[in-house]
Image: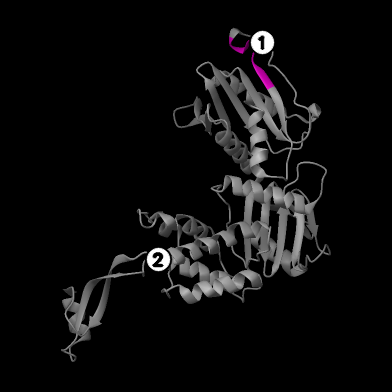
């Protein structure tokens, strides 16, 4: 890693004097944190920060702070970086929390490469296959009558120049919202990227890409986008552009203190990764995620229970999985009572014969059961399943995960 790169693991501290962590960076993170009651990425401590269960990248100016996951005693940064990238690639459509702004740096096999390299490749592909055209309405003062004459504006503009016509007409060209978004993103990457290898590709794209007018992008801008058969190929690049543009807010005092947090909730990522692994490998079973069931209600409000994964092997064989990104590693004394009670509720409401709490780690799987106190709780089991974390081929690892529940 270059001199402006800091690497930490989740739940670790970063204090003034550590590595390249300066007072200026601390003040930027303090400002970014603000006075929000709930802020998930890190907590402020005396002259430093303590990272929470979110992993990813926070960049302040040119300094990149990388926060990696960790589920055992192994502290090999390259190993955990590879694991995180592999999980993100497998999940792919995982919803990213990126609430802010920054200049980004891409490095081979880094977390940032996963998204910025992907965006560049997508745009390169679109240019190679040919950019789509659309009809658009436009206004202009022309020398010939074309489209619909706008009388009021024509009088204002052409009181002297009788040879001109101010009209509203239809044009068929490449200037439409999809290309405006991509061009805006390319221009942003040109200014914030610090990788020389990627910079040349970005500059080449900007030379080949038709110049577009600047637009203001909001969440509503992306909500209004619809895709057709001709524009479906734009979906991936637009999704990445959405992540970048909606969350980039440059430092108005010069950009040196801009901050971007590209962060992932490790608990949700783990849940999604286990689900995707089962879905791709257990083809003969019905596998669903986030299945909602009514749990409690009053006149004004209701509550639902939502287990992570429900596996239906057949009509009378249901397994409910609750994935937890916790370091338990076979040590039952660290098992949460709340996790067990939650598992028990799942077993009753889903009439599951088996419930499993799924943790990362190399511990031995533990078979457990709920004590019987009625006919409904007879033979209800709750196992602790430990999934060894692999840094080899992701598909092999996903197959190993699926084999535990086959």
- Residue position marked by numbered label 1 in the rendering: 372
Query: Which residue is at a point 45% across and 57% down the rendered structure image?
Result: 219
Mark 1 and mark 2 residues within 8 Å of each other at the beta carbon: no
Cα distance between the residues tagged 1 and 2: 65 Å
x, y percent for residue 138: 27, 72
x, y percent for residue 384: 71, 26
Q: Indicate the colouring scheme.
A: one colour
Secondary element at tag 2: loop
| Residue 379 falls within the magenta-colored stretch | yes
Displayed quadrant of residue 345: top right
Q: Is residue 336 above or below residue 112?
A: above
| Crowding at mark 1 (Cα within 10 Å: few <14, some 14-19, many 20+) | few
Taking the image as shown, residue 216 lies to the left or right of residue 194, namely: left
Quadrant in which the N terminus appears: bottom right
Magenta span of residues: 376-382
Q: How many marks?
A: 2
Sequence order check, earlier mark of 1 and 2: 2
- Residue position marked by numbered label 2 in the rendering: 131
Q: Is residue 54 above or below residue 396?
A: below
Query: Which residue is at a point 75% across and 23% down the rendered structure image?
Result: 366
x, y percent for residue 328: 77, 34
């Amino acid at each position: 890693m270059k001199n402006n790169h800091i690497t930490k693991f989740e739940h670790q501290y970063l204090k003034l004097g550590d590595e390249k962590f300066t007072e200026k960076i601390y003040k930027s993170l303090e400002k970014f944190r603000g006075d929000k009651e709930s802020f998930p990425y890190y907590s402020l401590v005396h002259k430093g920060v303590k990272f929470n269960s979110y992993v990813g990248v926070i960049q302040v100016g040119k300094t990149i702070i990388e926060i990696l996951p960790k589920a055992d005693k192994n502290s090999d940064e390259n190993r955990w970086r590879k694991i995180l990238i592999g999980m993100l690639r497998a999940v792919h459509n995982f919803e990213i929390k990126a609430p802010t702004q920054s200049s980004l740096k891409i490095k081979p096999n880094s977390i940032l490469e996963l998204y910025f390299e992907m965006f560049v490749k997508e745009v390169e592909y679109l240019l190679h296959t040919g950019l789509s055209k659309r009809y658009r309405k436009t206004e202009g003062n022309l020398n010939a009558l074309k489209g619909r004459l706008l009388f009021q504006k024509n009088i204002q503009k052409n009181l002297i120049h009788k040879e001109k016509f101010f009209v509203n007409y239809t044009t068929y060209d490449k200037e439409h919202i999809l290309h405006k978004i991509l061009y805006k993103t390319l221009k942003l990457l040109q200014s914030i990227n610090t990788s020389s290898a990627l910079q040349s590709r970005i500059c080449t794209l900007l030379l080949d890409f038709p110049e577009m007018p600047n637009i203001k992008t909001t969440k509503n801008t992306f909500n209004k986008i619809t895709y057709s058969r001709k524009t479906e190929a734009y979906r991936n690049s637009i999704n990445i552009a959405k992540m970048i543009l909606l969350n980039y807010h440059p430092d108005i005092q010069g950009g040196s203190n801009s901050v971007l947090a590209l962060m992932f909730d490790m608990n949700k990522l783990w849940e999604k990764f286990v689900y995707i692994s089962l879905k791709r490998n257990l083809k003969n079973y019905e596998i669903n995620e986030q299945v909602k069931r009514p749990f409690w209600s009053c006149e004004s409000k209701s509550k639902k229970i939502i287990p992570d994964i429900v596996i239906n092997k057949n009509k009378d064989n249901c397994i409910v999985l609750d994935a937890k990104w916790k370091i338990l590693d076979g040590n039952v004394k660290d098992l949460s009572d709340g996790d067990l009670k939650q598992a028990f509720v799942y077993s009753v409401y889903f009439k599951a014969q088996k419930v499993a709490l799924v943790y990362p780690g190399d511990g031995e799987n533990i078979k457990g059961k709920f004590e019987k106190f009625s006919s409904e709780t007879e033979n209800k089991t709750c196992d602790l399943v430990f999934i060894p974390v692999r840094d080899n081929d992701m598909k092999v690892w996903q197959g190993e995960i699926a084999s535990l529940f086959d």
